Image (cartoon, grey):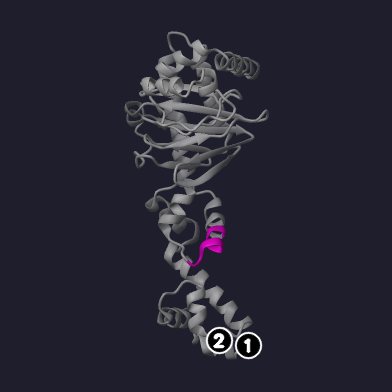
Amino acid sequence: MKGHIADLLGRQEREDGAAARSDEAIVAAVRREFSNADELLRAAQEMRLRPSDFFAAEHFPDLPVLPRRTADRFAIRKHTASQRPYLHAQDFYELICVLHGTCTQSFAGAPPLRLRAGEAVLLAPGAVHKLARAGAEDLILKLILPPPLFDALAILSRPQEGSATLFSPSDETFRFLLLALLREQTEGDELSERATGALLLLLFTELRRSREADPPRTDEALERYLAAHFRTASLADFAARSHYSADYAGRRIRRATGKSFSQLANEYRLRMAAKLLAETPMAVEAIAAEVGYADPSGLYKQFAALFGMTPGEYRRSFT
């Protein structure tokens, strides 16, 4: 199967490369893939740009209107090197899977997400994002699922509109299912529709299993987040930066650590306060403000509960 898949991927690279150089092919693709195609083409005309310069330029120009992709059927394709980054929205679910290399997703109003080999992200309808250009060593597959198909699979609960959910299904089974789907879509026969449905059920089952397994990345990511944001840390902010819903992030944290986000954030702040008490002459009130307590009484109470002594007693133990 490897040689066959390599031929399919090479063919997609050549097809997309040729299309990116053809004004006629680009206009046809825009009319086919964007619900606001007329606005986009009119904007290109008003900016006096050829479609190949407007839609396939190395640096996609700022647009007066947000491109909105649309789809009414399943598709799977490689993210080819000729595809340029551009911010857009969509009315379908998109599963982006990294089989080799890396992939960077940028979002409107949220930090970028860098995927590694073996990881995937599910973008819900309404997500405003752009996908960085693929490098020579990257192998990234994009699956398009219209909402009725996603709902019919009934494997994952429907995510929040505009959200991005990270998965880590680093398993050879997941890779095999992706490549089998690619083959069915490109070289299909009269049984391909049934085969595609069965493969999608298996693929999303693997996604759900990987989600429920709670990979160890959760507590590592939380530790890095608290180190950088302990003064203002919140579950909502951590979840947004991790591209999870707050409820899901909270459950992952509790499964990985046995504690809630607020418990871990408070413990981190208290450890920082203890370090400052031991190593600096700062007043307790100043330390409370430094580690994120609006009221020093909160620090006094929680410090005593964790360390079994007041901040003053803790400092004196070091002197």
User: Which structural element holds mark 1?
Assistant: loop
Distance from disc 1 to disc 2, alpha carbons, whole Å, reads 7 Å
In this rendering, does residue 252 appear at all?
no
Furthest toward the top, the residue is 190
Marker disc for residue 314: 2
Crowding around mark 1 (Cα neighbors within 10 Å: few <14, some 14 to 19, many 20+) is: few
**Whether residue 270 is situated above or below residue 140 in the rendered picture:** below
Is the N terminus in the top left, top right, bottom left or bottom right quadrant? top right
- Would you say 73 lies left or right of 48 here? left
Residue drawn at (64%, 20%), measured in percent from left and top?
A: 2
Q: How many marks?
A: 2
In the image, 191 versus 282, the foreground residue is 282
The image position of residue 171, as x and y in percent, is 57, 36
The image position of residue 39, as x and y in percent, is 37, 23
Residue drawn at (57%, 34%), measured in percent from left and top?
A: 132
User: Which structural element holds mark 2?
Assistant: helix
The image position of residue 71, as x and y in percent, is 38, 22
Residue drawn at (61%, 25%), measured in percent from left and top?
A: 81
The image position of residue 19, as x and y in percent, is 55, 14
Residue drawn at (44%, 50%), measured in percent from left and top?
A: 240
Marker disc for residue 119: none
Mark 2: amino acid: Tyr
The question of residue 243 being in magenta is answered with no
In this rendering, does residue 76 appear at all?
yes
In the image, 273 versus 46, the foreground residue is 46
Crowding around mark 2 (Cα neighbors within 10 Å: few <14, some 14 to 19, many 20+) is: some
Mark 1: amino acid: Phe
Q: Is the C-beta separation of discs 1 and 2 under 8 Å?
A: yes
Marker disc for residue 318: 1
| Residue numbers of the magenta segment | 224-231
